[in-house]
Image (cartoon, grey):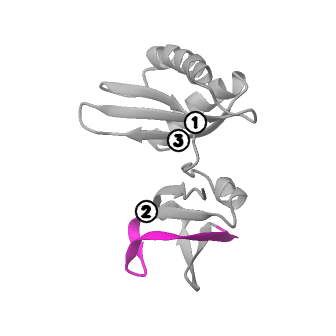
Amino acid sequence: MTKLQKLQDLLAPIVEALEFQCWGVEFISQGRHSVLRIYIEHENGITVDNCELVSRQLSAVLDVEDPVSGEYTLEVSSPGMDRPLFTLEQYAAYVGQQVKIKLRAPVEERRHYQGMIRGIEEDDVVVQVDSYEYLLPFELIEKANIVPNY
């Protein structure tokens, strides 16, 4: 189990107990200035007060459990309009939307894709770029964000 999965397993139940959805967890290791970012969602939207409430609860658990070695900053945020995607279910929910994807390793000699999510096939995300559809293996996706349509 990865460090990220352990953090997700530890923190998601706390977020859900506060009646929010845990949209996703990111850990960005930047030497001595790492960031643990938790994205929360609610059908009525997210306020600064919601983020503060969740942050206080998560801080208490993180202090006791101490799952991250070294110093880090805890951030609690709404996923926003350019929301990151963390699960295949999230990709499926945004079929028809534009997405920007960065891969860990190249597929067809590319690591960066921007196109429309066409669907999910087993463990692949189907993305249409211009008139071509690419099957991008979910495990190779390093980062993906919805491209907002203003």
Q: Earlier in the sequence, mark 3 or mark 1?
A: 3
- As measured in the structure, the alpha-carbon distance from the residue carrying label 3 to the one carrying label 2 is 20 Å
Residue 41 in the image: state x and y as whole percent: 66, 36
The secondary element bearing badge 1 is classed as: loop
Residue 61: numbered disc: none
Residue drawn at (46%, 44%), measured in percent from left and top? Answer: 2
Question: For the view shown, which residue lies furthest in the left direction?
Answer: 31
In this picture, residue 96 sits left or right of residue 76: right
Tell me if residue 113 comes above or below residue 141 in the rendering.
below
Give coordinates of residue 87: x percent, y percent: 61, 52
Magenta stretch: residue 112 in it?
yes
Q: Which x, y percent locates residue 67?
A: 43, 27
Q: Amino acid at mark 2?
A: Lys
Mark 2 neighbour class, 10 Å CA radius: few under 14, some 14 to 19, many 20 or more: some
> Which of the two discs, 3 and 2, labels the residue nearer the N terminus?
3
Q: Quadrant of residue 10?
A: top right
Q: Would you identify the image quadrant in which residue 150 lies?
A: bottom right
137 vs 83, nearest the viewer: 83
Residue count near mark 1 (Cα–Cα under 10 Å), binned few <14, some 14–19, many ≥20: many
Q: Given the current orientation, which residue lies at the most extreme bottom position?
A: 131
For mark 1, what is the residue? 78
**Which residue position holds label 3?**
5
Which segment did they paint magenta?
103-122
Q: In front of the other: label 2 or label 1?
A: 1
Amino acid type, label 1: Ser
Please, what is the dominant secondary structure of the magenta stretch? Answer: strand
Q: For the residue labelled by badge 3, is the local secondary structure a helix, a strand or a loop?
A: helix
Residue wearing tag 2? 102
The amino acid on which the numbered mark 3 sits, given as a three-letter code, is Gln
Residue at screen point 54% across, 68% down: 137
Q: Which secondary structure, mark 2?
A: strand
Q: CA distance from mark 3 to mark 1?
A: 20 Å
